[in-house]
Each structure stands twice: as structure tokens, then as C-alpha cells.
Amino acid sequence: MKRLLCTMLVIVLCFSSFCIVSKGDCIIDEYVSQLIEIDESFFSDSNLELIDHTEDSLVSPLGSAKLIQFYEDTLYKGYCIIVEDAIVEFSSNLSPYTLTTLSTPESQYYYDFANYGLIDSSFVLCIDSAGNALFDDLQTELVPIADGINGIITGVSPQLQLSSNCIAAALANVMWYWNSHGWSSLAPNGFSSLRSNLHSRFSSLGFANNNVPTVANQYGATCSPRVWFSSNVYWTTSPTYVFYEIDAGYPCMLGYAAGDTSQGLTYSTTVGHMTMCFGYYYVGNQLYVTLADGHSSGTKTKIWCIYNDCTISVRPYSL
């Protein structure tokens, strides 16, 4: 089964006496050691002295990335994907890039938070985990590759909405991020307790985007030490305020109006949905945003579209 790990879960391990020997060379000991630490069963049926590997570069908006595939003699053992020296994904299955029949000798591999692709000339052809081409929604069609990328805030651990309201869950995800980034009084009892508390407060005031600043500061007043929030609600389809918040290092809340869901651009035909946004980048002239959307425990990447109707800043501070 494929595993996705938070990109900022940089696992610092020391294995001073541990060395995997392959054909006389000591190879990528750190990553093999980390895999064993993460999942002790990953190489449980392997002779580590026979483990060899191949390594391929990945083009990624997330940073320096590579695909490492492991073999025991000629037997395939699995793969891992490394971004900025941290393992972000691993599996004992064949990699999507290995499974695909669509690549050519000129193709480059593309990776973005469990989204896989092949670059041919100036386009990305996205593929699924079985290596098949994806054309069924706008997020995965052929799109130009960017000359450069913009900001993605690392260290985010997306949490689920479950039965809570999406506005409460999105605000909880923002506070959950700050709880591990300097404001540890925000969630001393864990995410579930935080989410439930915020849900109750919205239930009293109304589940409305405009109530976010009030609820945030009501909750902050109960924390010890107290946390204040500078929060503003911007009703606009322009991404300007998303750029402003992310560039300054602040995750924000990003709303989706109800609309046509057939192309995957929004979440519902009848009701809006609120998410936490923690990054954006361009692929050619197409803007993408990275989200904790409450529906997935991993990162969701979506195209910026006409349904993005509301951005809410939520910046913690102390007096």
C-alpha cells in the first residue's frame, strides 16, 4: 500500500554503524534506514546486503526530487520518492513511472504530492498510480510546464473534516498548523478537540465565512497563553490575497462556491466548501493551489477557478 508522509516530517536518524553493501559500495543508507524506521516490514524479507537501487530525477514544484527504486538481485522490492532529502512517499508496488507505457526516452518524470506525470517537450501528461493517462478532468489534462514556481508552505499536516462543518474544519486546520509552529497553546488536546470546539462556536454564531474572525479570536481568548488573530474576509475571485498570505508565510482559508462539479473544479452543486490553502504555483499560465480540504488526509492540488470566491486571512499574534 502506498504511504504518503508530510513533507516536513524530516526524520533525523543516526545509524553510524549501519551500512548496506551492494556490489562493494555503501549506497543510500540513510533512506533505507528511514524506510525501516517508518515501516519495519518494508525490507523484512530481504537480505540487505543484496539490496541495489536505481535513481531518477523528478521535475517537481516542491523542490529537489528523485525516484529511488530498490532491487534484491533482480527482484523488485519497491520505491520511494524523496523531496528535499525527505521521504514523502513509498510503496512495495511498482512505481507509476515504471508501470506506464506512455514514456519515451526523451520523457522526464514529474511529481507533485502523489500526482505523477511525464514531461514531453513543454507539456505534462499526468498518469495515475497504475501508469495510465488521465484526461478526465482539467486538473490532469496536458498543461504547460512552468518556467518558475511560487510558494508552498511546508510542515502542513492536513486533517479531516469528518462530521464537522467545513468552515470549522478549515479554521481548525489553520490553527493546527500554527500549533506546531510557535503557538502550542492552540491545540493542547489534539485536533479533534480543536475542531469540535470551533464547530460549537460556529454553531452558535452561524456557519458563515464572515464569522471566522470572531470565532478565531473567541477561541484564542480561551488559550493559555492567549492567542490573538488578525483576520480578514475577502470576497473576491482574484488570487491576490492568497498570494499575499502565502508569500508572507501564512496559510489562509480558501472558499469554493457551489457549481458544476463535472470537471473537478469545485466540491458541490448545491453548497459551498471551505478549505485551508497553504501554497500556490504556476504550470505555464495556469495557477494551482495546494489545499487541506478536509476530505483528504493528504494534500489536494486544484486549479484556481471561478468558484474560488472567498479568501480569509488568519494570522496569530501575541501582545
Image: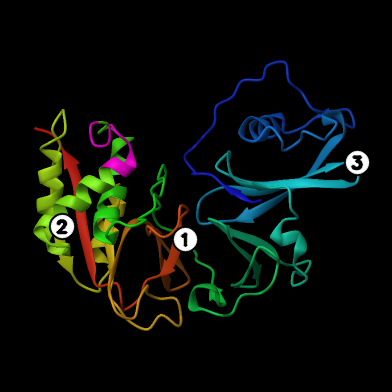
Residue 242 image-quadrant placement: bottom left
Sequence order check, earlier mark of 3 and 1: 3
Within 10 Å of disc 1 (Cα), the crowding (few <14, some 14-19, many 20+) is: few
Q: Secondary structure at mark 3?
A: loop
- Look at mark 1 in the image and give the residue it sits on: 148
Q: The disc labelled 3 sits on which kind of residue?
A: Asp
> Label 2: few (<14), some or many (≥20) within 10 Å?
few
Is 12 magenta? The answer is no
Residue occupied by mark 3: 73
Mark sitting on residue 203: 2
Q: Rounded to the nearest whole Å, what is the CA distance between mark 3 and mark 1?
A: 40 Å
Q: Say if 185 sits above or below 149 in the image.
A: above
**Tag 1: amino acid:** Gly
Instruction: Where is residue 46? Give x, y as percent.
Output: 83, 34
In the image, residue 96 lies at what x, y percent? Answer: 70, 61
Q: Residue at x 25, y 74 (%)?
A: 237
- Report helix, strand or loop for mark 1: loop
Q: CA distance from mark 2 to mark 3?
A: 60 Å
Residue at 75% across, 55% down: 94
| Prevailing secondary structure class for the magenta stretch in the rendered image | loop
Q: Is residue 83 left or right of residue 54?
A: left
Q: Magenta span covers which residues?
A: 185-193
